[in-house]
Amino acid sequence: MLIAFFFDSSRFLIESIGAMLATVFAAITTFQKILFCKDDISFVRIVKVVRFKIRSTEIVVHFTHVCKETTIRLKGCGLEVKLLFLCTMDAIDYAKSYQPAGSPVQEVIDAELEDVGIRLLIKRDDLIHEHISGNKWRKLKYNLSEAVLHNHHTLLTFGGAYSNHIAATAFAASKAGLSSIGVIRGDEDLTNPTLKFAREHGMRLYFVSREDYRKKADDEFISKLETEFGRFFLVPEGGANGLGVKGCSEILTEVKEDFDVVCCAAGTGTTLAGLSVSLKENQQLLGFPALKGGEFIKDEVARLIVESRLKPPTTNRLQLVTDYHFGGYAKIEPELLDFICGFQERTGIRLDPIYTGKMVFGLYDLIGKQFFKIGTTVLIIHTGGLQGWNGLQHRGLL
Ligand SMILES: Cc1ncc(COP(=O)(O)O)c(C=O)c1O
């Protein structure tokens, strides 16, 4: 008999899981393998608790075919697998929502680029998931698993009132069975769609003045938050930490096509850091800061790579293009909106107005100025952020 466990570990106290498994193991004498969901973070916790019980057992970590039934027959080998669902969460929902798969690469077919001699590809990370899309999933992935691994029940993070990161963290935390707290810059606004979404997904919102918000990395301020909320796992604003970089370093590993240049929007520089460490020798990275004065991002990228402990690139292949911020963060001009609409009409691809819209606008401008050699293949990273449109509408900016 094979035994498979599917559960959301955070819904259980680790002690009770251990006790439960100890009972199960005591009752079973003939099992050979224990199967867990693919990349199941619960696996690590269980191995820690019951290591002594399963030392002599062969463990298969990757079990990709999640099944609802309690008993299934493995095709081909005739083995019967008993599935014990130790949680209330449906395993298929869990796999879909908490472990989104990667994303496809597609060719951008745009009549406007005919005859310019540049091939455009786009990595559709916006398609990863409806709510944890783009670089949000990449940056949260290892933060979530680290939080669960260290027995945290609450995530705390920071963001502006329309932040993509706040919306995605609320959703991802709820799916991982964690509580979440969002420390929000500015005054409470119950009609704001991003904050409404975050609340609906269980995030507790804590509004602070702009002055206090600037202290978000200060030890004293963090201690005050701990006094207020108790123990939490802190995810910095925008998911900007070494774990975020690690997740972003996986983006290019999913790209099989050859390319010469990668273009990506930048805010904190975490995504650029992840891309930098996974570039090949002959590839170049163009980062388009979405905010004014984005030159600081270069130092941030270097700092974040060190924090990630990933192997830094041997040569610097990152170039920042700082001319396409349209006046600053979340500043929108009619010219930008026209471009985004035209791009969508011609290619069928929707960009967001805060990050990817500005980046692709800049890229097209550079192509028009013959910045790239003829024959260059450019890969655009679509980092998602489409919920940002709701925020602009709410502010009456559309
Ligand atoms: C849609 C979108 N694209 C790009 C970025 C910039 O990413 P990073 O902060 O990693 O530079 C963000 C912000 O996190 C974002 O929400």
Image: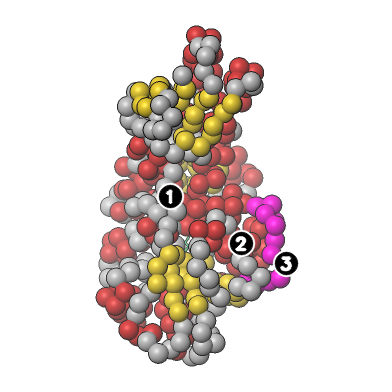
Q: Is mark 1 within 8 Å of ligand 1?
A: no
Instruction: Note whether residue 164 is visible.
Output: no
- How many angstroms separate mark 3 from mark 2 (CA)? 11 Å
Q: Position of residue 258 (x, y in %)?
A: 53, 71
Name which residue type carries label 1.
Ala
Q: Earlier in the sequence, mark 3 or mark 2?
A: 2
State the predominant SS element of the stretch in magenta.
loop
Residue at image position (59%, 45%) is 221
Residue at image position (34%, 52%) is 130
Q: Earlier in the sequence, mark 3 or mark 1?
A: 1
Asked if residue 311 is among those painted magenta in the image, a careful observer would answer yes
Label 2 neighbour load within 10 Å: few <14, some 14-19, many 20+: many
Name which residue type carries label 3.
Thr
Residues at marks 2 and 1 touching, judged by CB atoms closer than 8 Å: no
Circle 1: element type: loop
Q: Quadrant of the C terminus?
A: bottom left
Instruction: Note whether residue 26 is visible.
Output: yes
Residues at marks 3 and 1 touching, judged by CB atoms closer than 8 Å: no
Residue at numbered disc 2: 278
Circle 3: element type: loop
Instruction: Name the quadrant containing residue 271.
Output: bottom right
Residue at numbered disc 3: 314
Q: Which mark is residue 172?
A: none
Seen from the viewer's position, the closer of residues 214 and 262 is 262
Residues at marks 3 and 2 touching, judged by CB atoms closer than 8 Å: no
Q: Give the magenta-colored segment's residue range.
A: 306-318
Q: Position of residue 321 (x, y in %)?
A: 55, 78
Judge whether 390 appears above or below 288 on screen. above
Residue at numbered disc 1: 101
- How many angstroms separate mark 2 from mark 1 (CA)? 19 Å
Residue at image position (46%, 70%) is 380
- How many angstroms separate mark 3 from mark 1 (CA)? 30 Å
